Amino acid sequence: MFRSQVLVCGGTGCTSSNSTKIIEALKEQIREHGLENEVNVVRTGCFGLCALGPIMIVYPEGSFYSMVKVEDVPEIVEEHLLKGRVVTRLLYDETVEKDTVKSLNETQFYAKQQRVALRNCGVINPENIDEYIAFDGYQALAKCLTEYTPQQVVDVVKESGLRGRGGGGFPTGVKWSLAAANQADQKYVCCNADEGDPGAFMDRSVLEGDPHSVIEAMAIAGYAIGASQGYIYVRAEYPIAVHRLEIAIQQAREYGLLGKNIFGTGFDFDLDIRLGAGAFVCGEETALMTSIEGHRGEPRPRPPYPAVKGLFEKPTILNNVETYANIPQIILNGAEWFASIGTEKSKGTKVFALGGKIKHTGLVEVPMGTTLRTIVEEIGGGIPNGKKFKAAQMGGPSGGCVPAQCYDVKIDYDSLIQIGAMMGSGGLIVMDEDTCMVDIAKFFLEFTVDESCGKCTPCRIGIKRLYELLDKITRGNGTMEDLDTIEQLCYYIKDSALCGLGQTAPNPVLSTLRFFRDEYVAHVKDKTCPAGVCKHLIHYEIQEDKCKGCTLCSRVCPAEAISGTVKNPHTIDQSKCLKCGACMEKCKFGAIIKK
Amino acid sequence: MRKSISNLPFKGTAEQEQKLKQVIEAHKDQRGAVMPVLQEAQAIYGYLPIEVQSMIAEGLNVPIEEVYGVSTFYSQFSLSAKGEYNISVCLGTACYVKGSGDILNKLTELLHINPEETTEDGKFSLTACRCIGACGLAPVLTVNDDVYGRLTVDDVEDILKKYQ
């Protein structure tokens, strides 16, 4: 027994800010003080509050240390672990209230969350199967194999109302029943961990923090549809996730939880990992399977659907990481429990990756139906620097922007579709008044142009043309007719592209056109960028009355565009100015303004 | 995605070739072996020159055009040699919104190379990458395995100095 447990986050965010070195230093200090039999150091998955990383939690007190540095470790060990005095200066400020320390779950960030898919992330050591088992791990698999027929498993998942968390929101139980109904000598269970949306990292955190929940769920799916082999297709850009998955699969095999004759029931199931190689289109189900087969990851026309003819032409189901992470809890707690969370048509919880202009960047899991305002203002801590909320981009390159007037919309699959966004995999990027919506739409199109596989014409050429039109507008050369052309082209592409990538690529444009048309018009008619982002439409000016003639700006200007003599107001030669903004940044008197 | 192809001559060693042959042997009977083999080959050589791709095609008994098709499709596969230090700037949404584009521009200016290029002395190469998932630290860049987060344009020069 250890008297104290020190949990250090080993997710990608905290590892990037040096948590590995902190763990090493901790272990060394603990040894030096002879505490190695009293204090245990655990490297966990993501706690969610990535903005405050590296994060360390000391139990039993539950002290939440944030932004810990290697230099802080000796103090923590000596004061807290040896003498029992919490190091208040390193605590996350929201947990400190007058003279008491609040529990983590009472802080704004965690209070409104409900953790189902992330239940073990930041709680257990993901590299130790025993810790997962201690938290009811593999009980759901045992229950399925010994108490349920495959049909009953499918029924439970159906009744729970679980819908695919990867974006589309297709009912998971229906998908399973379709594949179960097809007879074949071999079927496959696949897991989509090719999380390609820029700004989304839910799946990575589940794999890093709780890999066994996905493995267990895939085995349950294998039993339900009659498959003996599974593949996890994971991004090669996630080395920590891949490493922990490998360890987890190996441990599960050693415990007989993967392989032949699981729990002595005669059920066989094994898993392999396939690494993606950086192609966004491989998140589309048919493209992903083509990629596992070893080819260029190009999508195939549907039908035939994967449930009929999928991987290696056999019936296949493909679910997303977060979808799987919900399955063991549904089996253990029952379909009714799960269906009691969320809204009428969207059951359960959803994990969102908060990013962009928000105080608490990180991972949150909330019941379906939570409003965007609650997520951004209460959980996310609002927008820094006193700026105003302008929009949230949801669903990545396939989704759209949710503007301030929809701040109180209850988030579920259907309400988001109604306002032209989509759940996507759960990336949620917050934007403030300094973000130009035309530029953002262009940014996403640049991404899809780059990632289009080139198989079908609407996507390969259509999106490129769309991008060029937006580029023209951001350069101040657009016309009002261009806006109509853009809208028309968007609908053509949506109707005719082969796969999900092309069909949804126009969404960022359509949704910004719908809610921020005035910004487009300002670019076209007034030749201005209201947010001051589009370089071709802004210019810098020196205000004569404020300029002291210190000459600093003329010295930093890379284009030698600023002239003037000492102690006299300077001027900018607009024809030479590169609009880099270096002068404005350096001016100590606030004399340079951007227009 | 545009791929730049190395114009430097291929300088593989016998030891590397030996390793590659073992990899090919291990995957020979596996279905869909081209991608895993290319991934391991890139780990051995650092990139995938055409010479390596033909060895793979021959070893796995698949047409070279199929191997080339796969290697040019995925952005992770590099057909040109990287510098000793590969600098990768994240242009994912979260980083972009926080100004990673300016950081990339600063690097192009300081190194006199464009993204996907290598400096003449072979010291630095520059890439623009998609989200690496460290959005909490945005904007982020990596130099080989070192991660630098919460950056401003002014930090760039100091980071470069560490490797010069």
Image (cartoon, rainbow, N blue to C red):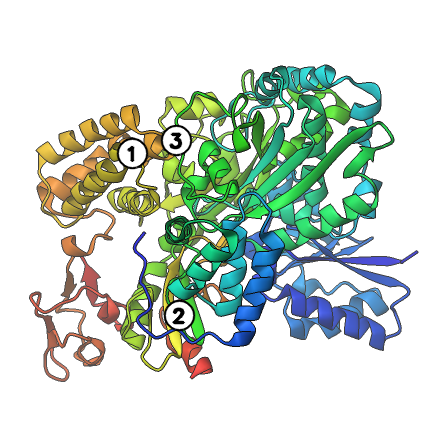
Q: Position of residue A9 (x, y in %)?
A: 67, 56
**Looking at the picture, which amino acid does disc 1 mark?**
Cys
The residue carrying mark 2 is B81
Instruction: Please tell me if label 1 and label 3 are on a single chain.
Output: yes
In the picture shown, does residue A383 fall above or below A139?
below
Front residue of A482 and A524: A482
The residue carrying mark 3 is A500
Q: Is residue B10 left or right of residue A30?
A: left
Label 2 SS? loop
Q: Residue at x 46, y 61 (%)?
A: B55
Front residue of A352 and B130: B130
Q: Residue at x 71, y 15 (%)?
A: A151
Query: Whole-Å distance between the Cαs marked 2 and 3?
Result: 34 Å
The residue carrying mark 1 is A456
**Looking at the picture, which amino acid does disc 3 mark?**
Gly
Residue A47 seen in render: no
Mark 2 or mark 3: which is in front? Answer: 2
Q: Are marks 1 and 3 in contact (CB under 8 Å)?
A: no
